[in-house]
Amino acid sequence: MSAQEPDLLTEQIPGPRLAIVAEALFLANLLVAPGLAFLVLLVLWRRHRDSAPLVVRNHLRQTLVASIYGGAMLLGVSIGIFMLGGLDDPWSWVLGILYFVSFHATLVIFGVVGLNHAILGRSWQYPFIGPDLYE
Protein backbone atom coordinates (compact mmCIF):
# COMPACT_ATOMS: atom_id res chain seq x y z
CA MET A 1 0.00 0.00 0.00
CA SER A 2 1.45 3.37 -0.97
CA ALA A 3 1.71 6.27 1.44
CA GLN A 4 -0.99 8.27 -0.36
CA GLU A 5 -3.72 5.60 -0.27
CA PRO A 6 -5.75 5.51 2.94
CA ASP A 7 -6.05 2.38 5.04
CA LEU A 8 -9.79 1.75 4.91
CA LEU A 9 -9.70 -0.53 7.95
CA THR A 10 -8.44 2.15 10.32
CA GLU A 11 -9.55 5.46 8.75
CA GLN A 12 -12.83 7.03 7.76
CA ILE A 13 -14.07 6.48 4.22
CA PRO A 14 -12.23 9.06 2.10
CA GLY A 15 -14.86 9.31 -0.63
CA PRO A 16 -17.72 11.81 -0.70
CA ARG A 17 -20.76 10.39 1.07
CA LEU A 18 -23.21 11.43 -1.66
CA ALA A 19 -21.24 9.52 -4.32
CA ILE A 20 -21.28 6.46 -2.06
CA VAL A 21 -25.02 6.84 -1.50
CA ALA A 22 -25.60 7.11 -5.27
CA GLU A 23 -23.75 3.86 -5.92
CA ALA A 24 -25.49 2.16 -3.00
CA LEU A 25 -28.86 3.25 -4.41
CA PHE A 26 -27.90 1.81 -7.80
CA LEU A 27 -27.25 -1.53 -6.12
CA ALA A 28 -30.41 -1.25 -4.02
CA ASN A 29 -32.39 -0.61 -7.20
CA LEU A 30 -31.04 -3.86 -8.62
CA LEU A 31 -31.20 -6.02 -5.51
CA VAL A 32 -33.51 -4.79 -2.76
CA ALA A 33 -36.00 -2.10 -3.71
CA PRO A 34 -36.40 -1.71 -7.48
CA GLY A 35 -38.21 1.47 -8.36
CA LEU A 36 -38.10 3.00 -4.88
CA ALA A 37 -34.31 3.26 -4.85
CA PHE A 38 -34.44 4.65 -8.39
CA LEU A 39 -36.87 7.39 -7.31
CA VAL A 40 -34.58 8.38 -4.42
CA LEU A 41 -31.62 8.42 -6.84
CA LEU A 42 -33.60 10.60 -9.24
CA VAL A 43 -34.42 13.07 -6.45
CA LEU A 44 -30.76 13.21 -5.37
CA TRP A 45 -29.64 13.79 -8.95
CA ARG A 46 -32.16 16.59 -9.49
CA ARG A 47 -31.18 18.25 -6.22
CA HIS A 48 -27.38 18.01 -6.58
CA ARG A 49 -26.69 17.85 -10.32
CA ASP A 50 -25.38 21.43 -10.53
CA SER A 51 -24.04 22.15 -7.05
CA ALA A 52 -22.19 18.98 -6.03
CA PRO A 53 -18.45 18.44 -6.47
CA LEU A 54 -17.32 16.93 -9.76
CA VAL A 55 -16.81 13.37 -8.49
CA VAL A 56 -20.29 13.36 -6.91
CA ARG A 57 -21.91 14.66 -10.08
CA ASN A 58 -20.14 11.94 -12.06
CA HIS A 59 -21.40 9.20 -9.76
CA LEU A 60 -24.95 10.60 -9.66
CA ARG A 61 -25.11 10.88 -13.44
CA GLN A 62 -23.50 7.48 -14.06
CA THR A 63 -25.84 5.65 -11.69
CA LEU A 64 -28.96 7.39 -13.01
CA VAL A 65 -28.19 6.75 -16.68
CA ALA A 66 -26.99 3.19 -15.99
CA SER A 67 -30.23 2.52 -14.10
CA ILE A 68 -32.34 3.79 -16.98
CA TYR A 69 -30.41 2.02 -19.76
CA GLY A 70 -29.85 -1.13 -17.71
CA GLY A 71 -33.52 -1.39 -16.77
CA ALA A 72 -34.63 -0.75 -20.33
CA MET A 73 -32.25 -3.42 -21.64
CA LEU A 74 -33.25 -5.93 -18.97
CA LEU A 75 -36.96 -5.53 -19.61
CA GLY A 76 -36.87 -4.79 -23.33
CA VAL A 77 -34.72 -7.71 -24.39
CA SER A 78 -36.51 -10.10 -22.02
CA ILE A 79 -39.90 -9.09 -23.38
CA GLY A 80 -38.53 -9.34 -26.93
CA ILE A 81 -37.30 -12.87 -26.31
CA PHE A 82 -40.72 -13.96 -25.10
CA MET A 83 -42.55 -12.14 -27.89
CA LEU A 84 -40.42 -13.80 -30.55
CA GLY A 85 -40.37 -17.27 -29.00
CA GLY A 86 -43.71 -17.36 -27.26
CA LEU A 87 -44.52 -18.06 -23.64
CA ASP A 88 -45.19 -21.74 -24.28
CA ASP A 89 -41.80 -22.51 -25.86
CA PRO A 90 -39.34 -23.94 -23.30
CA TRP A 91 -36.36 -22.52 -25.22
CA SER A 92 -37.76 -19.02 -24.82
CA TRP A 93 -37.72 -19.56 -21.08
CA VAL A 94 -34.19 -20.95 -21.12
CA LEU A 95 -32.90 -18.06 -23.22
CA GLY A 96 -34.94 -15.41 -21.35
CA ILE A 97 -33.87 -16.53 -17.89
CA LEU A 98 -30.25 -17.00 -18.98
CA TYR A 99 -30.16 -13.50 -20.47
CA PHE A 100 -31.86 -11.86 -17.50
CA VAL A 101 -29.66 -13.53 -14.87
CA SER A 102 -26.42 -12.91 -16.79
CA PHE A 103 -27.13 -9.26 -17.58
CA HIS A 104 -28.46 -8.58 -14.09
CA ALA A 105 -25.33 -10.09 -12.51
CA THR A 106 -23.16 -7.97 -14.81
CA LEU A 107 -24.97 -4.81 -13.69
CA VAL A 108 -24.47 -5.81 -10.04
CA ILE A 109 -20.74 -6.31 -10.60
CA PHE A 110 -20.52 -2.91 -12.32
CA GLY A 111 -22.34 -1.41 -9.33
CA VAL A 112 -19.91 -2.95 -6.86
CA VAL A 113 -16.95 -1.60 -8.84
CA GLY A 114 -18.63 1.83 -8.96
CA LEU A 115 -19.21 1.70 -5.20
CA ASN A 116 -15.55 0.86 -4.68
CA HIS A 117 -14.52 3.85 -6.78
CA ALA A 118 -16.92 6.10 -4.85
CA ILE A 119 -15.47 4.93 -1.53
CA LEU A 120 -11.99 5.78 -2.81
CA GLY A 121 -13.17 9.19 -4.05
CA ARG A 122 -12.59 8.44 -7.74
CA SER A 123 -14.86 8.87 -10.74
CA TRP A 124 -15.83 5.80 -12.73
CA GLN A 125 -17.70 5.27 -15.97
CA TYR A 126 -20.03 2.31 -16.43
CA PRO A 127 -18.88 0.29 -19.46
CA PHE A 128 -21.15 0.39 -22.52
CA ILE A 129 -24.13 2.05 -20.79
CA GLY A 130 -22.50 4.90 -18.88
CA PRO A 131 -22.34 8.45 -20.26
CA ASP A 132 -19.08 10.33 -20.64
CA LEU A 133 -17.54 11.67 -17.45
CA TYR A 134 -17.57 15.36 -16.63
CA GLU A 135 -14.10 16.83 -17.03
Image (tube, helix red, strand yellow):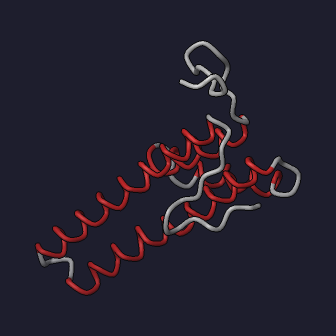
Of all residues, the one furthest to the left in this rendering is 90
Left or right: 76, with 91 as reference point: right
Task: Tell me residue 68's x, y (percent).
Answer: 57, 66
Left or right: 8, with 100 as reference point: right
* Occupied quadrant, residue 99: bottom left
Front residue (pair 6, 25): 6
Tell me the quadrant of the picture where the C terminus can be found: bottom right
Question: Residue at left 82%, top 51%?
Answer: 48
* Tally of numbered discs: 0
Of all residues, the one furthest to the front in this rendering is 2
Of all residues, the one furthest to the top in this rendering is 10
Left or right: 28, with 82 as reference point: right
Front residue (pair 60, 127): 127
Question: Residue at left 38%, top 56%?
Answer: 106
Task: Tell me residue 43's x, y (percent).
Answer: 74, 53
Of all residues, the one furthest to the right in this rendering is 51
Front residue (pair 80, 20): 20
Task: Tell me residue 67's x, y (percent).
Answer: 55, 60
Question: Residue at left 65%, top 44%?
Answer: 122
Query: Is residue 45 shown above or below 122?
Result: below
